[in-house]
Image (tube, rainbow, N blue to C red):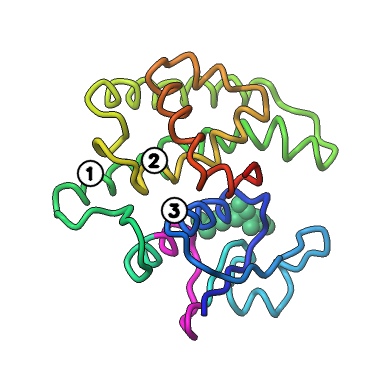
Amino acid sequence: MLTIYGNPLSTCTRKVLCLLAEKNAPFEFSLIDFTKGEHKKPAFLARQPFGQVPAIEHDGFELFESRAICRYLDEVLDGPKLIPGDARDRAVVEQWISVESANFTPHAMRIIYQLMLGPMRGQTPDLTIVEMARASLGHTLSIMEARLERSEYLAGPEFTLADLVYLPYIEFLFACEQGDLITGHPLVGAWWSRCSARPSWRRAAGRG
Ligand SMILES: N[C@@H](CCC(=O)N[C@@H](CS)C(=O)NCC(=O)O)C(=O)O
């Protein structure tokens, strides 16, 4: 029995939902309602001490942190593997996941915060922060562009967890009308089109 504690609008929950759709795995979804502050209440803090989604419970085993959850579920569930068994192939997947968490997502989230999450809380966007984050993200995207000259997906010829982890942030960049960052890099744009057309991502993003 697998239960996901999350919110369908959360980027990190969507990573796990996409992985589960790739595996066609059954699960129960337990909604953590941010509007009621459920993520900061003791019942959820007992599962995730930082008060952030997602968390899972799998046959009594509890885990939080979206990337750790994805790695675990990829290993224990049936279905296509999103992390290869070969040591070198797996290392390349891990390399691009590290790039996502260190060099992509912090810049993307600064943009998303300024243009979407902050304004939802009544804050005025700081366009200087947006411009600085766009420049930093542009540098990362140029490195991804160069990589995609060598393979259809970031870690090789197949879609892997290395691609999946970027998708929620790119979806929100488009929602903030910053999609030019992606389409301005033709190979990254084509890669995004391939990845975002997958039924698993469409389902995770609430479009399929
Ligand atoms: N490193 C964590 C980050 C989780 C995270 O930031 N979740 C966001 C939603 S995408 C959240 O719960 N935010 C509410 C908060 O931080 O109070 C993971 O990958 O699971």
Q: Considering only vertical position in the picture, is 40 above or below 182?
A: below
Frontmost residue, 185 versus 135: 185
According to the picture, the residue beneath numbered tag 2 turns out to be 163
Q: Is residue 68 magenta?
A: yes
Cα distance between the residues tagged 2 and 1: 11 Å
3 or 1: tag closer to the N-terminus: 3
* Spot occupied by residue 200 in the image (x, y as percentages of width and height): 50, 48
Q: Are marks 3 and 2 in contact (CB under 8 Å)?
A: no
According to the picture, the residue beneath numbered tag 1 turns out to be 92
Total numbered badges shown on the rendered structure: 3
The quarter of the image holding the C terminus is top right
2 or 1: tag closer to the N-terminus: 1
Q: Which residues are magenta?
A: 58-70
Cα distance between the residues tagged 3 and 1: 20 Å
Specify few, some or many for label 2: CA neighbours under 10 Å numbering under 14, 14-19, or 20 or more: many
Which quadrant of the structure image shows residue 102? top left
Residue beneath the point at 30% across and 29% down: 152
Residue beneath the point at 50% across and 39% down: 167
Residue beneath the point at 33% across and 52% down: 82
Mark closer to the observer (3, 1):
3
| Kind of residue at disc 2 | Asp
Q: Considering only vertical position in the picture, is 98 above or below 150?
A: below
Mark closer to the observer (3, 2):
3
* Spot occupied by residue 85 in the image (x, y as percentages of width and height): 19, 58
Q: Identify the secondary structure beneath mark 3.
A: helix
Q: Which mark is residue 22?
A: 3
Q: Are marks 2 and 1 in contact (CB under 8 Å)?
A: no
| Kind of residue at disc 1 | Val
Which quadrant of the structure image shows residue 38? bottom right
Farthest residue, direction bottom:
60
